[in-house]
Every structure is written in structure tokens, then in C-alpha cells.
Image (spheres, helix red, strand yellow):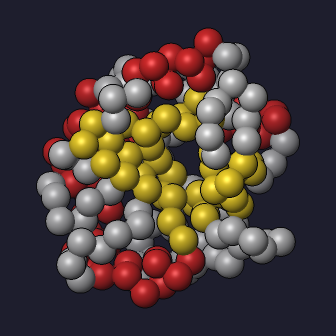
Amino acid sequence: FAFARVSDGLDFSDPKFAQNYAGIRAAGMVRGVYQTFRPDEDPVAQANLLLQNISVPMPTGDLPPALDVEVADGQSPATIAANIQTWSSTVQNATGKAPLIFVGYYFWTSDVQSSALADNPLWIVQWNVSCPNLPTPWNAWQFWQHSDAGSVAGITGEVDLDTFNGSEQDLLDLV
């Protein structure tokens, strides 16, 4: 599996998204998309930007979209949590799939502090550990980014490395 970034908020659309998104499928891999979330920008507009860049309904074999939550942008935990929920609801209503939430334990614990997204699958990021810490409200992770310094044949430079928590059939069931 692999994920392609659509954008960083509203102001930066990834110029390689279309190439990466198509390339994942062409390589015979399960693919997903993600968007870097900006809590100080309109969450519906961000969700709509993601949705405009993928097919809805989603193609068979695609993972649920993911929201990369890593910055507070000066917003309070309550605002961040509410905007994540709005983005998530917008995407889920359009795709029929609960989006993944990509976040680190410490950021979620200090900057989001919400239990409201327990039904969204967790994509946890934590490097250099044998098992990641899980923020409340999750008691399991779906994906785990365990390195940002990997290498993959056919890709120049370092890439993030992730693990899926399950079998290949579990991954196929998710799509």
C-alpha cells in the first residue's frame, strides 16, 4: 500500500499528486490519499479540495482518505477537534468511508484532546520504538508510520515507512 498527498491545506496542492496517485495503482498496490490539515482554514473547503481530486464514489480497491493532523496553527484544542470532525464528516458523507486520522500521540494529547473521533481508524506516527503509544480515544492502530528514513525501489530519496496492523486480507477488506 501507499498514500499520495493531495494538498497541505488550501494553499498548496501537491504538484505530483496525480502522477503519484496513478503510479500507485499502476504498480499494483493498494492506494490511499491524504491531506495535511490546517486547523485555521475552512475544514469543509479542505475536504472538498480532497474530494475534487479523487473519484467519488471511490474506486474499488482504494483505502479510506486520511487526514494528517500535525500542526495547531494557533488554534485551541476545541477548535482543532471541531474542525477535524467537520472535515471527517464531510469526507465520510461523500465517500461512505470513515477517514483515517494520522497523528502522533504527543500532538493529539496536548493539542487536540478529543475523544470524539474514536470511530475513525488511527494512523499513528512514532519513530524509533517497538510499539507506538496510542492517544485517547483509540485502543488500536490501523497503520503505523515507524520511520521517515526508508528506501523503496523506484523512488529517489528517503520515504516514510508504514505498517498495516493486520493481514493482507484484512487490508483488502478495508478497501
Residue at 52% from the left image edge and 82% from the top image edge? 106
Residue at 41% from the left image edge and 72% from the top image edge? 116
On screen, 109 above or below 50? below
Q: Position of residue 64 (x, y in %)?
A: 51, 39
**Residue 42 visible within the image:** yes
Q: Position of residue 130 (x, y in %)?
A: 83, 71
Residue located farthest toward the front when viewing the structure as drawn: 157
Quadrant where the image shows the N terminus: top right
Residue 53 picture quarter: top left
Residue 149 picture quarter: bottom right
In this picture, residue 113 sits left or right of residue 103: left
On screen, 110 above or below 161? below
On screen, 132 above or below 76? above
Residue at 33% from the left image edge and 29% from the top image edge? 15
Q: Position of residue 112 (x, y in %)?
A: 38, 78
Residue located farthest toward the top when viewing the structure as drawn: 26
